[in-house]
Amino acid sequence: MPEKVMMNMGPSNYPFNETYATLIPALLIGDSVVMKVPNTGGLAHFLTMEAYAECFPAGVVNFVSGRGRDTMPPCMESGLVDIFAFIGSSKAADALVKARPWILKCNREMNIYIYICLGVGGFG
């Protein structure tokens, strides 16, 4: 059973390296991951999606596609996201976390934003 749920939103440029820099550590510590596949560059993840389906139990690695402004707010508002890993601009990150006002920003280096959602899953 996964410990936490991490929502992972990587960029369309450098979609592999930047996305998996947060996704793989989450899997290694026992978290499940919901990855928002970028509209541009999303096909780069096709082979890894198949590999995840073969290697992990159902529900450990999940994928969401679509326009971020349409798909991300419902995900964040669901209350099911414990950790939000985002790589992009601070303006976009701040707009996304408005859906979770009790969120704690814990890392903001080199445009990699990691947020811990307080009040769920033992955080806070």
Image (tube, grey):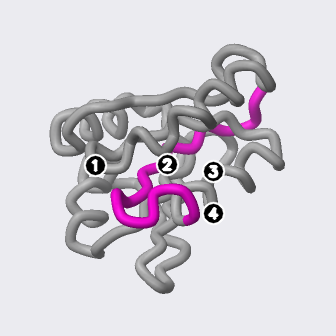
Give me the disc on residue 40.
1
Mark toward the viewer: 4 or 1:
1
At mark 3, the secondary structure is helix
Q: Nearer the viewer, mark 2 or mark 1?
A: 1
Category of crowding for the residue at label 4, using alpha-carbon neighbours closer than 10 angstroms: few (below 14), some (14–19), many (at least 20): some
Do labels 4 and 3 touch, CB within 8 Å? yes
- Which residue is more in the foreground, 109 or 42? 42
Marks 2,1: beta carbons within 8 A = no
Q: Which residues are magenta?
A: 1-17
User: Is tag 4's residue or tag 2's residue first in the polypeptide sequence?
Assistant: 2
Q: Is residue 53 above or below residue 65?
A: above
- Give the residue type that dot 2 points to: Asn
- What kind of residue is marked 3? Leu
At x 49%, y 48%, the residue is 8
Q: Quadrant of residue 119?
A: top right
Which residue is under mark 2? 8
Q: Is residue 33 magenta?
A: no
User: Is 4 within the magenta?
Assistant: yes
Instruction: Give the residue type at disc 4.
Output: Ala
Q: Residue at x 77, y 24 (%)?
A: 56
Query: Contact, CB < 8 Å: mark 4 with mark 2?
Result: no
Q: Amino acid at mark 1?
A: Thr
Front position among marks 1 and 3:
1
Ranked by sequence position, the earlier of labels 2 and 3 is: 2
On the picture, is 66 further left or further right than 57? left
Point out the tag, 1 or 3, that comes first from the N-terminus: 3
Helix, strand or loop for disc 4:
helix
Q: In 3D space, how far apart are the residues under numbered discs 4 and 1 (Cα atoms)?
A: 19 Å
Depth check: give the residue in front, 67 or 47: 47
Q: Earlier in the sequence, mark 4 or mark 1?
A: 4
Q: Is residue 112 above or below residue 118?
A: below
